[in-house]
Image (cartoon, rainbow, N blue to C red):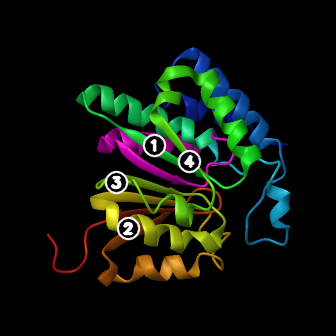
Amino acid sequence: MADLSIISQALASVRASEATLQLLRDLHTQALEEPPYVSTDDQAESAALDRFVALDPDKCALVYLLLRATGARYVVEAGTSFGLSTIYLALAVGQNAKFLKAPGKVIATEKEEAKASRARQHWKRAGDEVEKWIELREGDLRETLKTNLHQSIDFLLLDIWTPLAMPTLAVVKPHLRTGAMVVVDNVIVGKEGYKELMDHLADPKNGFRTTTVPYAGGLQVVVYVGAEGEA
């Protein structure tokens, strides 16, 4: 049985209205009570269609705090699913943007129409503190992210089918500012599927510095320091 106490611990890290906090409680409870899914295990891809396949609550809290600490205002999420982690991204981006009196946007991506619809319903429940900061792009993100990305992306969340991780980074990387962060979920349990991505991140010539944080399944925290020769 899932340990639901971790939800309250995670939400203690987040600034949000009581209505949004209750929504997050409800969504995390549903997500934790479903069977786990990792794209490199022996389950069919179709098994994920009716599941949240969401970041764990403690990981969501960390991502929220990283965004707040860095003042991130332009974020890309690869793998939105039912939009649970997107709520944390939008809360942080919206709060940063308001504090800095500047614009901000979360670019969310989802291939499955039914999942995108569920995500929109959840964001609508959260209201303006979440919904207005999100732009959802439906379809193959290798295409939907090719155009109209901000020239200085602060943060990329990779919580996606592992074969799409490296292609996603390749599309977004030209837009990453120096100092931008990339967070990748399930890098230990999904090690085989993430090999190309992890090899790329580990090569100093590509401009990344990285560490594995010991959350369940492994969480990779990456900073783009710029290609060799850049400041």
Q: Secondary structure at mark 3?
A: strand
The amino acid sitting under disc 4 is Lys
Distance from label 2 to label 3 (Cα)?
A: 9 Å
The residue that disc 1 covers is: 106
Which stretch is magenta? 58-83
Say what secondary structure mark 2 lies in: helix
Q: Amino acid at mark 1?
A: Val
- Name the spot of residue 190 as percent of width and height, x first: 66, 71
40 left or right of 59 in image: right
- Across and down, in percent, residue 159 comes to 59, 58
Residue shown at 38%/83% (left/top)?
203
| Nearer-N-terminus badge (2/3) | 3
Q: The N terminus is located in which quarter?
A: top right
Q: Could you tell which of marks 3 and 4 lies nearer the N-terminus? A: 4
**Location of residue 17 with respect to 10 vertically, above or below:** above
Mark 2 or 4 closer to N-term?
A: 4
Query: Where does label 2 land, which residue?
Result: 173
Say which amino acid is labelled 2.
Lys
- Res 153 label: 3
Reply yes or no: does residue 73 show up in magenta: yes
Residue 45 percent coordinates (x, y)? 80, 65
Going by the numbered disc 3, the residue's amino acid type is: Ile
> Residue 187 lies in magenta, yes or no?
no
Residue 165 against residue 19 in the figure, above or below: below
Q: Are marks 3 and 4 in contact (CB under 8 Å)?
A: no
Inter-mark Cα distance, 3 to 1: 10 Å
Which picture quadrant has residue 201?
bottom left
Secondary structure state at the residue bearing disc 1: strand
- For the residue carrying disc 2, how many other residues have a C-alpha within 10 Å: few (<14), some (14-19), or many (20+)? some
Give me the disc on residue 59: 4
